Amino acid sequence: MALPIEDYALLGDTYTAALVGKDGSVDWLCLPRFDSPACFAALLGEPDNGRFRIGPTGGVHATRRWYLDTSLVLITEHVCDGGTIQVVDAMPVRDAGGTVDGGNADLIRIVSCTAGSVEVEVELVVRFDYGSVVPWTRRRDDGDLHFVAGPDALVLRTPVSLEPDGMRHVARFRVSAGDRVPFVLTWHRSHEPPPASIDPEAAVTATVDFWSGWHGRADWVGHAEGAVHRSLATLKALTYAPSGGIVAAPTTSLPEHLGGVRNWDYRYCWLRDASVTLRVLLAAGHTSEAAAWRDWLLRAAAGRPADIQVLYGARGERRLPEAELPWLAGYEGSSPVRVGNAAHNQLQLDVFGEVIEVLTGSEEAGLPEDDDAEGLGLALLDWLEGGWRQPDEGVWEVRGDRRHFTHSKVLAWVAFDRAATCGWGPDPARWRAAAAAVHAEVCAEAVDPTTGAFTQSYGSPGLDAATLLIPSVGFLPAGDPRVLATVEQVERRLTDRGYVRRYETAEDVDGLPPGEGAFLPCTFWYADALALAGRVPEAQAVFDRLLAVRNDVGLLSEEIDPGTGRLLGNFPQAWSHVTLIHTATLLRDVKRP
């Protein structure tokens, strides 16, 4: 069985990513890209679905782990009966000239002994196509193990002799103080010969240097600096280097409720993440990543305005058909396991506001002007001028009936407001009039007459945490009675042991069985709303609680179970880390004299 989600750490090479557990098992790895089929899929099934485990054979008294400096080079230390070992895990950042799959990909694992003498065991189970395909395996003349199936091949290079044991390869060996034993697993195209071997020690050093240089370009200092820098590194690791797109998470089907069906594929790029991601990257001084993300957005959103999608593939792919993988039992029995995401066909009006905010805000923030940006924005605004009155599936991508979601309308207002403020088009007053029309309708239709708070949708008494964003986007000031009433109702009806759930009456909203954790970005939005309302000490307390939720290496998932404290949902989640940076920035700024 897979470990608790919080027991995993992230490795990444800016093309794909791996999850390695505290027990030394790489249980998830898709090669060569984030959205490629996994060759290690034990995370969503059993060990026989693929994993690469290295760990001590005897009793372990203590395990701790950390990232080396500011890098994504992971050190896992086991204090054992006979001594102490460390396992160094790294994925060297690829430099393949922006090719589609980045050429070859390497996973480096180095076992070192820092004290005494320890016996170590290795288990390698390669299963291509999400744990379903047993590869053809042979030992090459040079002693390397070679695994081939379809378009994929892996080669393992190590001085340790792994022997077949059924459909896996295993070994045991002993290390003593000062020993260092490397394992290098390399993906390549199966129709090409294995690439030349690399120096694992030099590659680890180069990986540390890359991350050190990348962090050296940042100028973010202040509140929760360590947490912010780890979140920035996570966003960088979730960036698909050739295009600049940032995937929502490197995993699929990690459940929002253990044993439930809310299991989605997040290995794609969502437009709604664009505006806040751009802001936090620019605030931290990472202008090249911000520019690449904006350029990805321009390319992805190009086309007829009515065809704009909620999410795209890492290169801007539009067709992301959803399918289920019945041979995988799911994380802790949470089925189905899904690949692809049918939400790409939904209408979500908020994405228009998010795209327009990126296009207008990026130039104000100092990014170079783009001749196509205003043209694309005006085309989107032309459609939205009539289209904003439609019901949609909303920010939570409901799979039930469309509704007039309040958040969607507020973000439509954002689109018109930003365009009018920037003077877009020959008649900016046109956008000001449209913004006024949206504003008037939302204030008339989306306020509960009993509580005075904004509701999730027109005509429904249900509450939605997304309405906490109303003061953040400038729709109303934080001190407006309706905003204050909304915060109060969220505190009373959506907050569970300090964490905020997305909305009420889940079954009625999206047609799925009820049951999910508290959504971490919503809790960050709650902290933002408190800070903007002048309740800074309370906002700080919420933020501190969220920092404590991070796992031992500073990573966040999508949700948390307030009762058990377990992390839920895909991991690590870009949106959670983006909102962490945003809240840290807001708290830093409101505390400045």
Image (cartoon, grey):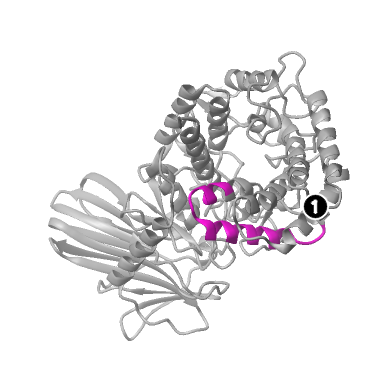
The amino acid type of the residue labelled 1 equals: Leu
197 in relation to 253, above or below: below
Q: Residue at x 77, y 15 (%)?
A: 449
**Magenta segment, which residues?**
279-304
Question: x and y percent of residue 142 in the render?
Answer: 31, 84
Work out whether residue 537 or residue 188 is closer to the camera in this orientation and state it.
537
Residue 245 visible in rendering: no
Question: x and y percent of residue 136 in the render?
Answer: 46, 76
Question: x and y percent of residue 373 in the render?
Answer: 72, 58
**Residue 292 falls inside the magenta stretch:** yes
Q: Quadrant of the C terminus?
A: top left
Asked if residue 500 lies left or right of residue 537, the reply is right
Report the residue marked by disc 1. 380
Q: Residue at x 58, y 72 (%)?
A: 100
Res. 203 image quadrant = bottom left
**Residue 81 falls inside the magenta stretch:** no
137 in relation to 126, above or below: below
Question: x and y percent of residue 394 in the render?
Answer: 73, 39
State the predominant SS element of the stretch in magenta: helix
Q: Residue at x 73, y 53 (%)?
A: 309
Work out which residue is located at the far right of the displayed protein and give it. Answer: 386
Asked if residue 71 lies left or right of residue 82, the reply is right
Q: Secondary structure at mark 1?
A: helix
Work out whether residue 170 or residue 315 is closer to the camera in this orientation and state it.
315
Asked if residue 16 lies left or right of residue 422, the reply is left
Residue 424 visible in rendering: yes
